Amino acid sequence: MNILFFGPNGSGKGTQGAILQKKYDISHIESGVIFRDNIKKGSALGKKAKEFIDRGELVPDNITIPMILDRLKEDDCKKGWLLDGFPRNPEQGEAIKKALDEAGMKLDYVIELLLDREIAKNRIMGRRLCANDNNHPNNIFIDAIKPAEKDGGFVCRVCGGSLTARSDDQDEAAIGKRHDIYYDKLKGTLASVEYFKKLSKQGYAAKIIELDGKPGVKEVSEVLVGKLG
C-alpha cells in the first residue's frame, strides 16, 4: 500500500501517519527527514542539496525527487510507504507522479486531511508539553485532551505535571507562513492535491480519500482505516 498523505500543520497528520504505519506495517516517510539523512550521510545528492540550503535557497526538484525515490526503494518500503510533506505544489505533484510511473511504483491512495485554517492554527498554539512525559497529550483547544485546571491554570490531564508551550508553537507568523504555502489553491499544496484529484477523475489508479480532521484522533483513525479497508 503506497500513500501520499496531505494535511496542514496542526491537523494531526503525523499522528494518523504513525497509526497507519503500525497497523499496515508500512514505512512513514517524511520529506524533511530524507534531506537530513542524505546530508548527514554525505551522499552525492545530500552534498548537492546542502549547497542550496547553505545559500538559503530551495533545493530543486531534480535533486529532491531522486532522493525521495531512493528512499522509497529501500528494503523497509517493500511492504508499502506513506509519503508525508511532499509534494508542496502542483509542479512537484506532476514531477513525483512521473517519477513514480517511470520507476514502476504504483500509487494506491492520496489522503487529504481536511481542517479549517483557524482551527489548525489554534491546535498548534494550544499544544502543551508535560514536564513528566512528553507523550502525555495536552491541548487547550481540543476538548478530548484539554489539560486539567488547577489554581487558575492548567496541569497535565494525565499525571498533573506542570505544562509548558514550545516557542515555535507560539510563533504565529511562522505558523502563518507554513499555512500560506499549504492552503494556497493556485500554487501551493492544495493545488497539488487538486492535481491528483483531477487525475483520479481521468482514470488514474490512485484512490482519493478526503477525511474530516475536526474529530478526535481515535474517531479520525477509525474512519480512515474503514476507507482503506
Image (cartoon, rainbow, N blue to C red):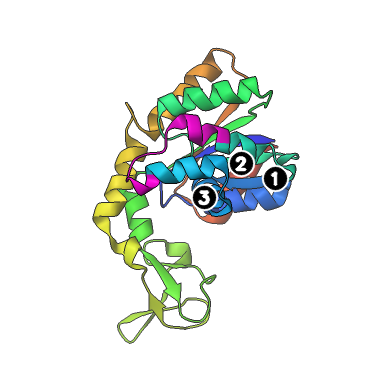
Q: Nearer the viewer, residue 9 or 93?
A: 93
Disc 3 or disc 2, which is closer to the eye?
Answer: 3
Assign a secondary structure to mark 2: strand
Which of pointers 3 and 2 lies earlier in the amino acid sequence?
Answer: 3
Which of pointers 1 and 2 lies earlier in the amino acid sequence?
Answer: 1
Q: Note whether 149 is above or below 188 in the view shown.
A: below
Which of pointers 1 and 3 lies earlier in the amino acid sequence?
Answer: 1
Q: Which numbered disc covers residue 26? A: 1
Q: Is residue 5 left or right of residue 191?
A: right
x then y, percent, for residue 127? 40, 65
User: The disc labelled 1 sits on which kind of residue?
Assistant: Ile
Density class for disc 3 (Cα within 10 Å; few <14, some 14-19, many ≥20) is some
Assign a secondary structure to mark 1: loop
Q: Is residue 203 left or right of residue 13?
A: right
Q: Which residue is mark 2?
A: 82
Residue at image x 47%, y 83%? 160
x then y, percent, for residue 65? 53, 32
Density class for disc 1 (Cα within 10 Å; few <14, some 14-19, many ≥20) is many
x then y, percent, for residue 203? 59, 14
Assign a secondary structure to mark 3: helix
Q: Which numbered disc covers residue 39? A: 3
Q: Mark 3 to mark 2: distance in Å?
A: 22 Å
Residue 225 quadrant: top right
Residue 184 quadrant: top left
Density class for disc 2 (Cα within 10 Å; few <14, some 14-19, many ≥20) is many
User: The disc labelled 3 sits on which kind of residue?
Assistant: Ile
Disc 1 or disc 3, which is closer to the eye?
Answer: 3
Residue at image x 37%, y 58%? 124
Mark 1 in CB contact with mark 2 (< 8 angstroms):
yes
Magenta-drawn segment = 53-66
x then y, percent, for residue 28? 62, 47
